[in-house]
Image: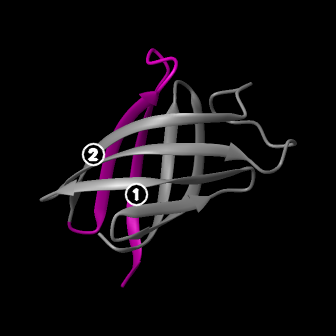
């Protein structure tokens, strides 16, 4: 799972994309408006994370507009070079997200 992943995410009819770097038990990454960071728990091909999403460019909206800084609770699985995850905002679990990713560089 360690490596650089290109990710796409969907919340309702809103879509976004970014890059995450996974290294052992941490993930970090971002896109044009947000930074993502958090611990990563792995068991076999499954993973879970509490990701802090922080706005670094106020001109870019979140797919969770108008929220700027928040935590996502994610769970997912990896199959080969593809990951699939679902999650929800920690404080508003009715706001859910779906994520797909492709491994671009392993290390």
Q: Name the residue under label 2.
A: 76
Residue 68 lies in the magenta stretch: no
Real-space Cα separation, disc 1 to disc 2, in angstroms: 11 Å
Q: Which residue is drawn at 61% across and 33% down?
A: 70
Q: Name the residue under label 1.
A: 101
Side of 102 relative to 15 (left or right): left
Q: Which residue is drawn at 52% across and 20% down?
A: 91
Side of 30 relative to 75 (left or right): right
* 16 relative to 93, above or below: below
Q: Residues within 10 Å of mark 2 (few under 14, many from 20)?
A: some
Q: Residues within 10 Å of mark 1 (few under 14, many from 20)?
A: many
* 73 relative to 46, above or below: above
Task: In this rendered view, identify the residue nearer to me: 62 or 13.
Answer: 62
Where's the N terminus, which quadrant? bottom left
* 4 relative to 106, above or below: above
Side of 32 relative to 14 (left or right): right
Q: Residue at x 57, y 52 (%)?
A: 36
Where's the C terminus, which quadrant? bottom left
Mark 1 or 2, closer to the camera = 2
Task: In this rendered view, identify the residue nearer to me: 105 or 71.
Answer: 71
Residue 35 point in image, percent of width and height: 65, 54
Question: Residue at the bottom extreme?
Answer: 107
Question: Residue at the left extreme?
Answer: 44
Q: What element carries label 1?
A: strand
Side of 42 relative to 5 (left or right): left
Q: Is the magenta stretch mostly helix, strand or loop?
A: strand
Range of magenta residues: 80-107
Residue 16 point in image, percent of width and height: 60, 45
């Amino acid at each position: 799972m360690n490596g650089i992943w290109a990710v796409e995410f969907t919340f309702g009819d809103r879509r976004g994309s970014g890059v995450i770097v996974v290294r052992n038990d941490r993930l970090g990454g971002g896109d044009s408006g947000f930074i993502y960071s958090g611990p990563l728990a792995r068991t076999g091909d499954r993973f879970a994370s509490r990701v802090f999403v922080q706005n670094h460019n106020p001109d870019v909206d979140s797919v969770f507009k108008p929220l700027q800084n928040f935590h996502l609770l994610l769970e997912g699985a990896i199959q080969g070079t593809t990951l699939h995850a679902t999650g929800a905002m920690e404080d508003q679990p009715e706001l859910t997200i779906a994520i797909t990713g492709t491994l671009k560089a392993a290390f």
